[in-house]
Image (spheres, rainbow, N blue to C red):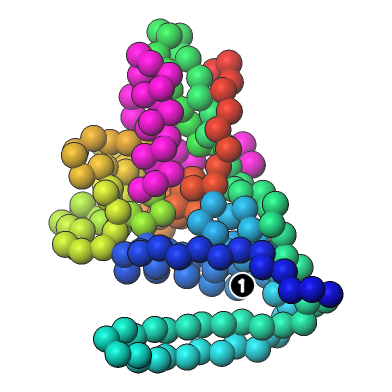
Amino acid sequence: MPDEHAHESERSRSRQALATYFRRIATALGRGDPVPVDDEGTVTVDPPAESDLEVELEREGETVSLEVEMEWAAREGAVDTDAAASKATFEVYADAADAWRWRLVHDNGNVVADGSQGYADKRDAMNGIDSVKRNAPGAHVVDLKRDETPPAEGGSDATFELFEGRDGNRRWRLVHDNGNIIADGGQGYASKRNAVGGLESVKANAPGAAVEETDG
């Protein structure tokens, strides 16, 4: 069988974005789920229970490279180049006041995120979705109750802020560096752990989520 080059990508990433990428891989491996290869999750591999692992650290001139390689027999692990990109969908709709809004709906029916405002133009709502897709995966998470601030380096152009609502529940919002709230959880959580779980779902599912227009 001839060699098949299923996927290759190369680009600069912040330390935070790298951590998010490897965390997605680790989570999938730990659960026994197909492992996402690209950011959108449209290419996945399903490694067997045991694989060969090769780690190589090399210095060549002024460049240092760290290579992590997994290998297994092709018959033991499937490759899917047309995988479901996400377990959620962005729904775009016009509300009762004819303002355009969006929400990110998990396959289980739960709304895991929505926009913090309505838009007069559908294109602005779509731009809001694009901003969430671009910024959520690598965004730092800070707890305002502990007066935490995001690191000066790494991350994306937005930050997930955990805070306590007036009802005493824990909430999150995704705040762009320009001060605009581009997404929030839309609900309160009884614990910080649950709130973090909600935003982690957005980190994992937003990049590859399909966008559909609905009736509201």
Tell me the SS state at disc 1. Answer: helix
Above or below, 210 against 10 in this view is: above
Q: Position of residue 200 (x, y in %)?
A: 45, 54
Which residue appears at 48% of the width and 31% of the height? Answer: 103
Q: Position of residue 87 (x, y in %)?
A: 61, 47
127 left or right, relative to 87: left
Q: Quadrant of residue 175?
A: top left
Residue 116, magenta (yes or no): yes
> Is any atom of residue 184 visible in this view?
no
Q: Nearer the viewer, residue 8 or 113?
A: 8
Q: Quadrant of the C terminus?
A: top right
Q: Which residue is mark 1?
A: 29
Q: Quadrant of residue 182?
A: top left
For label 1, the crowd category at 10 Å Cα-Cα, with few meaning under 14, some 14 to 19 and many 20 or more, is some
130 left or right, relative to 148: right
Q: Position of residue 58 (x, y in %)?
A: 40, 91
Above or below, 172 against 197 in this view is: above
> Is any atom of residue 60 visible in this view?
yes
211 left or right, relative to 78: left
Which residue appears at 66% of the width and 83% of the height? Answer: 71
What segment is highlighted magenta in the picture? 107-135
Count of number-bearing discs: 1
Q: Quadrant of residue 34?
A: bottom right
Q: Quadrant of the N terminus?
A: bottom right
Above or below, 157 against 149 in this view is: above
Which residue appears at 41% of the width and 37% of the height? Answer: 130
Q: Position of residue 100 (x, y in %)?
A: 42, 18
Residue 210, magenta (yes or no): no
Q: Amino acid at mark 1?
A: Leu
Which residue appears at 58% of the width and 21% of the height? Answer: 214
